[in-house]
Image (spheres, rainbow, N blue to C red):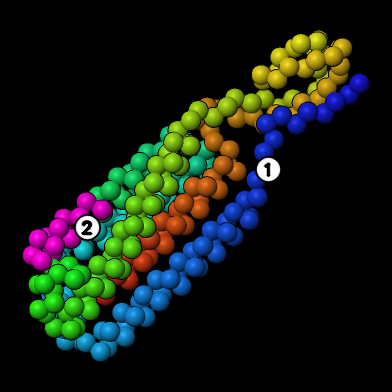
Amino acid sequence: MEKVLNILHEHRDRTGAKLGMWLFIFSEILFFGGLFLIYAVFRFKYTEGFHNASKELNVIIGTLNTIILLTSSLTVALSIKAIEIGKRKDSLLFLFSTIFLGFFFLINKYFEWSYKISHGIYPGSKSLLTLSSGEIAFYNLYYIMTGLHALHVFIGIIIFAFMFYLYSKEPRKKINLWGKSLKLLKGKEILGNKISGDVEEIKIEIRYFPDEDKVSMIDNTKLFNAGLYWHLVDIIWIFLFPLFYLIS
């Protein structure tokens, strides 16, 4: 009797996964696009108030965060490229750098917000209500939009932490024996599976990774999608930075 065993076969719809990610990014663009439209309306209405409020923001911290996110986009792109060419350790190093830079961004944002809050400048505060309508609108939008962006950065860090765990696991050793006949006795164990019955002739198809440091090219889909998400986060900040920090 001849059997064909396709061991360790996994179905992956890479095109569908990437298309789903692009659709998600499009929905995020629509969401933030609505916020940018609201910003444009209020800025047109309260031009002077927006300029005055913008002077109170720390341009140095804003610039530093811009550099941090741009650098993190580079490191995540290098991580994806390293996976594509099978350099798992290099990919993990760049991925760790991206996670570190994401935390660095959030730490800077925490100190920036803490400074403002310590001076009573936050939505609904008595100090904020003493300011002009334009300045109130500016700070409300500042906290809402940069807060939502910081939330997206935090989610991105969680995703990359999961990717780091996923790719840090040792890839399984596999051999390609397709088309070769093997004689198996009753109770013979193959990769943890018991083959029962009389002596049989089977064919086995197993993919092969020649090096433990190599990663299959099909495994980069999750990291590729995570990278798309992170690039979106960076692009949003590129718009937020001049709209809030540089208009003065």
The image quadrant where one finds the C terminus is bottom left
Which residue occupies 30% across, 68% down?
Answer: 145
> Which amino acid type is shown beneath numbered disc 2?
Lys
In the rendered image, which residue does mark 2 sit on? 109
Report if residue 171 is visible in the image: yes
Report if residue 246 is visible in the image: no
> Which amino acid type is shown beneath numbered disc 1?
His
Q: Confirm whether the magenta stretch covers residue 148.
A: no
| Furthest residue in direction right, as rendered | 1
Q: Is residue 4 left or right of residue 110?
A: right
Q: Counting other residues with Cα less than 10 Å from the Cα at mark 1, is it few (<14), some (14-19), or many (20 or more)?
A: few
* Marker disc for residue 187: none
State which region is magenta. Answer: 106-120
Which residue occupies 52% across, 47% down?
Answer: 222
Q: Is residue 244 left or right of residue 13?
A: left
Residue 204's x, y, as percent? 77, 26
Between the C-alphas of marks 2 and 1, the distance is 42 Å
In the rendered image, which residue does mark 1 sit on? 11
